[in-house]
Image (cartoon, coloured by chain):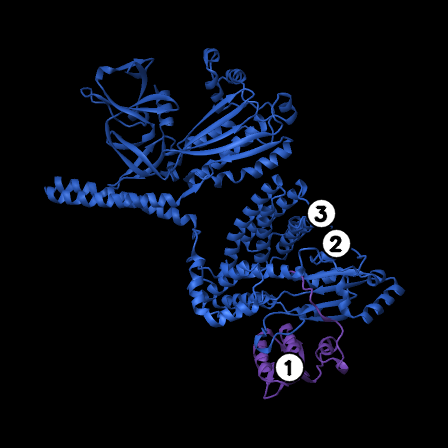
Amino acid sequence: MALELREDTGTLSGAVTVEEVEELVAWLRRTPGARLSLHNCNHLHTAAFQALLAFAPKVTAAPVDGFLAVRLLPVLDPPNAAVPEGGHHDDRDAG
Amino acid sequence: MNPLLAQFLAEAGDLLDQVGDGLLRLELDPGDAARVNEVFRAAHTLKGSSGLFEFPELTSLTHAAEDLLDAVRAGRVPLDSAMTDDLLATFDLIRGWLAHVTVEERLPGGADADAAALIERLRAPIGGQAADMPAGRTAGVARHAPDWVAHLGARVVAELADWLDTTSATMRFVRYLPDEGCFFRGEDPLLFVRQVPALEHLAVLRPDAWPAPDDYDEYACLLGFVLATRAAAGELEYVFRYIAEQVEIVELDAAALRSPAAAPVPAGTGPASHADADALAVLEAALRTLEPHDEDGPPGGGPSATHLGSVAHAAAAAARALGAPVELDPADAAGMRASIRSLLERARTAGGEPGPAATAADRRTGEPDRRAADADPGQVGSRVLKIDQAKVDRLMELVGELNVAKNGLTFLAEAAEEEYGSRALSRRIKDQYAGLHRIAEELQSAVMDVRMLPLSVSFSRFPRLVRDLSRRLGKRIKLVTEGEDTMADKDVIEALADPLVHLVRNSLDHGIEPPEERTAAGKPAQASITLSAVADGDAVIVEVADDGRGIDPARVRQRAYERGLIDEEELETLGDADAVNLIFQPGFSTAEQVSDLSGRGVGMDAVRASVERLGGAVTMRSEPDAGTVTRLRLPLSMAVTQVMVVSVAGQRFGVPVDLVVETVRVPRAGLAQVQHQDVVVLRDEVVPVVDLAGTLGMPWQPDPAADHAVLVVNVSDSKAGLLVEHFHREVDVILKPMEGLLRDAGQFVGTALLGDGLVLLVLNLKEVLSLGARAA
């Protein structure tokens, strides 16, 4: 079980797949100010990652996984609340 | 095969026809903006639908073609013949691929190499700038950094530039914009990013504003990625091999990083309008998927529940992109169809810009009415069913069997009267028969009507053929088609294809002179070939006319004489018109050189043979220096044949009625002999008579006391008599070709089942008469 969602805290562990995203989003939607531990999470499906970006829950424990910790965590939880590098894209190409 | 793929293949065929036809017309009239749009849309739809399947080569190739067409549409590039060649080659290649997919459900090997070569050629005219090439390939080191590199952050870019400057090295930069529906294809963009080796920097692109929590769709991918890596281009292409069309890879050095390109936004094709067009394409594709399927689909009909779910999501995402979000219930296919249709209509009428507020209000206030009201307009217009040909054939067969069963009633009526002595019952059976007969005839004509196709089906291949061949031969030719709407049975249309191709090729190759010769002769340099069709009662007349050099009757006569096709006397006496038709004789070929177009030894006799097999006739008129007209006369339908039944030695035979001239009874003394050949003199005309029983090797001697029954027929423009025992009535039969052991029995064209259950052999009179003549 990759999702453990309680009243206002949750834990993601293992690989979060696209099948679990619906549940995750439902929980985020009804839980403003949610707190989430990613400690044991190895991979976030893009849909899950996007949901975390969109609903911006507080990440209480950094993931151990290298890619998540180095590449994605700074985007999810910008250090010093600074505006993350990168930013908005409005030039989505016609696919 | 999965029904979605089957549907795509069926549609793709039509789209390819549209594109091919449109391109040919465009080449003649490059300024036809509506036509450019039409071709572009067809290519666009093809690309959109192909994205639903795992055929990346197909998608990237159609994408390249679409880009070129887009440039033509925007007037940035004029369409020339070389481009048309490339585009035609592209869609030919795709047609070949799809044929392969139909059988194997995958693209043929080597598809990527073929595609790459064509993509390069297609991109050449629009200046294959790397920055505008979302084809997932690098074109060496780019001179300017695309603007999206800036997403990595100014500090990162500056650092990288310094490092690359110091080391004189390059790095690869990737922009990956997953499309919104990518989750439904099982793609996890982050997983691809994770697999990028030697990832140096990653920037995540987010939408300008996140949707409100209630509107947030967890299955629409809104993110994009820009990354810098030290991995080689080949490694990157490997990682992104399945999603090449969503990825842009550039290789940059320090100088390039420091000189970003000016944002290249081509006029008129802003990303917004593009995105709208794509959203519309998605909606159209969704609508097509939701159209009711025939029973070939999975049990329950239509797409599966999972499939409906993904369609609902994709359509909802597209609707949002158009600014008109809707709620779609995957369980209610009909409702979804109605909503999508109304969305499309609104989007089109509003020029692709439906006001979100207004549509949202509409939706809340009057959705049920709207749905009901929209369902009807959507079904106006001709509703066309695509039916498997085999099903129509089966229907025709059943009609044939119904006829046979129906004819059985007449035998029953006779039996009722003669064997059981009940005249009243016999009459009632005959009444029933009359009613049944009427219905069966109507049914038959209804089914025949289904089988009718316009001649345009047959003509449609010629614009391309004439274009390609005339380019190859260096001749300038205009093709004119007339009467494409004339209808004929599909068997006739299909069987017509080969003879027509042969005739058109002949005209191109031998009939039409090179431009210099034409100008010298005072004709316009551009020759014309006219294909025309016109209905003529039970027949359709198809003509192939050219304004070439015509046929020299003297040369034809001389050649026919040399080949021993005519004797010396005929050489002197044969009229010009008849001489021209000698070229239909087997063994005649006027081509002095055998070219690869025509004159491969099959010659015009093959044309005549195939037309005659259809029960038609072919004639040719020609005027030296003015041109040649070949006229094919074909029956409208071949499904039902009227035959005259005759019998000899107790065995019945059928003779096609259109060959029968008359039936005569000749007194014993009326038969004379000329050189061992029986003849009969009819109205001062000597007609050879062939004994049918003798020819077929049946033991039968005519009754010396009785008159002879002679069936006079007209075969190959000459009359002949057939000595038989009795004449019977005419019947309509469904002729079945000879099969199995009887296949080689040349005396018969086929068999048919009679009402009393007996099998009727239908004679091939040409063969029978020549057998009889040999025996005499």
Q: Chain of mark 2?
A: B
Residue at image mark 1: A13
Amino acid type at mark 2:
Gln
Q: Quarter of the image containing the C terminus of chain B?
A: top left
CA gap, disc 1 and disc 3: 52 Å
CA gap, disc 1 and disc 2: 44 Å
For the residue labelled by badge 1, is the local secondary structure a helix, a strand or a loop? loop
Mark identifier at residue B129: 2
Amino acid type at mark 1:
Ser
Image x and y of residue B749, in percent: 37, 33
Image x and y of residue B202, in percent: 75, 71
Mark identifier at residue B125: 3
Left or right of B434: which side holds B748?
A: right
Q: Given contact means CB atoms under 8 Å apart, are the residues at marks 3 and 2 in contact?
A: no
Mark identifier at residue B79: none
Mark closer to the observer (1, 3):
3
Question: Which of the chains is blue?
Answer: B
Q: Place residue B710 in its image quadrant.
A: top left
In this rendering, the answer to whether B254 lies above or below B715 is below
